[in-house]
Amino acid sequence: MKAAVLVFPGSNCDRDMAVALSAAGADVSMVWHKESKLPDGVDVVAVPGGFSFGDYLRCGAIAARSPISRELKAHVERGGYALGVCNGFQVLTETGILPGALVQNASTKFICKTATLRVETSSSAFTARYNAGAEIDVPIAHHEGNYRVDEGGLARLQDEDRIAFRYTDTPNGALDDVAGILSDNRRVLGMMPHPERAADVALGLTDGTPLFASLAEALVTA
Amino acid sequence: MRATVTVSLKAGVLDPQGEAIKGALGSMGFEGVDGVRQGKVIELDLAPGTREDTVREMCEKLLANTVIESYRIEMGA
């Protein structure tokens, strides 16, 4: 598995993401946002958490218009895999790769805690190693994690089994308790919780490990 | 020339900041505030002759996220 982790000014989970991907066996390159090309043969592009461009204008808005984001879009259009976590999920919605938007938490507060998620589908390269219905503990740390999409958009996500994770006790007001969603070809996952912060015994949480292991398994031949 | 773009959350999209402001106004004793919506104003200094269509394109492509926001353009002198 060949992975690229995008780095924007203000990204701060890029190295954690690289460590989690490497631990799963990936050959990882870090790619600065001004690059206009992804490394050859990249299977999965990870868009990390953080505060790209200081969250100016809207979270992820400026990053979504960076040169590398055009490449990210082309990669996805070619059928490539992508994983966006937290600010990375916001970037994926801002590019239009994933539907909907992430707005301010209903409480207006920044929330930093471990959330319990229910894995809603094991039918994706990211969730194959989980059992559907399993509950996992994954940290969240965000101010704009309140998922919004129009009625038709939500119905599509539900009908197509594209809600990958739901909160068991929604902390941020997200519509239908959405914590993470898949693209229509199921090769792009955007999620607010941080699986890369739950993928090392030393960190005390390991429920994110199967996500990276699933991905490695799916992309093993690549 | 100057264009002023006002970006607002669409009706029906929860506005936690607006709700917080409304709560504060109520607690300060201002009565009859039925709703508060917070948006943003973006002022653009533009080359003379810039068309409103161009500003609309800026709104669609960057200044507003039309999934959740609407915008209004005022072209000034």
Image (cartoon, grey):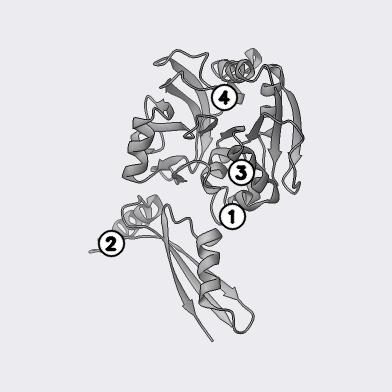
What residue type is disc 2 on?
Gly
Provide the residue designation for mark 3.
A73
In what element is the residue under mark 1? loop
What residue type is disc 1 on?
Tyr
Work out whether mark 3 precedes mark 4 in sequence or the reverse, and give the earlier one: 3
**Residue visible at 66% across and 14% down in the picture:** A202
Marked residue chain, label 3: A
Place of residue B7 in the rendered image (x, y in percent of width and height, measured from the top left): 45, 64
- In 3D space, how far apart are the residues under numbered discs 2 and 3 (Cα atoms)? 51 Å
Q: Nearer the viewer, residue A128 or A107?
A: A128
Provide the residue designation for mark 2.
B29
| On-image quarter of the N terminus of chain B | bottom right
- In 3D space, how far apart are the residues under numbered discs 1 and 3 (Cα atoms)? 22 Å
In what element is the residue under mark 4? helix
| Circles 3 and 4 on the same subunit | yes
Marked residue chain, label 1: A
Q: Report the mark closest to the observer, 1 or 3.
A: 3
Place of residue A8 in the rendered image (x, y in percent of width and height, measured from the top left): 69, 44
Marked residue chain, label 4: A
| On-image quarter of the C terminus of chain B | bottom right
Provide the residue designation for mark 4.
A195
What residue type is disc 4 on?
Pro
What residue type is disc 3 on?
Lys
- In 3D space, how far apart are the residues under numbered discs 4 and 1 (Cα atoms)? 25 Å
Pointer 4 with pointer 1, Cβ within 8 A: no
Marked residue chain, label 2: B
Q: Report the mark closest to the observer, 4 or 2.
A: 4
In what element is the residue under mark 3? helix
Number of labelled discs?
4
Q: Nearer the viewer, residue B26 or A53?
A: A53
- In 3D space, how far apart are the residues under numbered discs 3 and 4 (Cα atoms)? 23 Å
Pointer 2 with pointer 1, Cβ within 8 A: no
